[in-house]
Image (cartoon, rainbow, N blue to C red):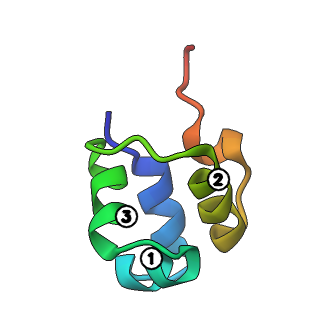
């Protein structure tokens, strides 16, 4: 499942995938794969992404209806 919430939050912060990757210590490809739903990030990476984007885990990674 694509992570459109993460992509939207990243765009709202005016971060490129590269900028978010640098802020979280991963590659741009990793960020792209998370947004495309092709990579399941670790909890520590989820937390780092949330901190970088100023969001909670629920706001970015909780699937609606589950």
Question: How far apart in space, not on screen, are marks 3 and 1 (Cα)?
Answer: 6 Å
Above or below, 50 against 16 in this view is above
Q: Residues within 10 Å of mark 3 (few under 14, many from 20)?
A: many
- Left or right of 11 on screen, residue 46: right
Label 3 or label 2, whichever lies nearer to me, is 2
- Left or right of 45 on screen, residue 2: left
Q: Quickly name the residue at label 2.
A: 44
- Measured as percent of width and height from the top left, residue 45 is found at 57, 57
Above or below, 7 against 37 in this view is below
Q: Residues within 10 Å of mark 1 (few under 14, many from 20)?
A: some
- Measured as percent of width and height from the top left, residue 48 is found at 65, 64
Question: How far apart in space, not on screen, are marks 2 and 1 (Cα)?
Answer: 14 Å
**Image quarter of the N terminus:** top left
**Residue drawn 40% across and 49% down?**
4
Q: Earlier in the sequence, mark 3 or mark 1?
A: 1
Q: State the SS at label 1.
A: helix
Question: On residue 21, which mark appears?
Answer: 1
Dot 3 and dot 1 residues touching (CB under 8 Å) = yes
Label 2 or label 1, whichever lies nearer to me, is 2
């Amino acid at each position: 499942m694509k992570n459109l919430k993460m992509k939207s939050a990243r765009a709202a912060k005016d971060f490129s995938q590269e900028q978010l990757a640098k802020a979280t210590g991963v590659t741009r490809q990793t960020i792209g794969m998370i947004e495309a739903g092709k990579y399941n990030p670790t909890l520590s990476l989820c937390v780092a992404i949330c901190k970088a984007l100023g969001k909670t885990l629920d706001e970015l990674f909780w699937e609606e209806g589950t």
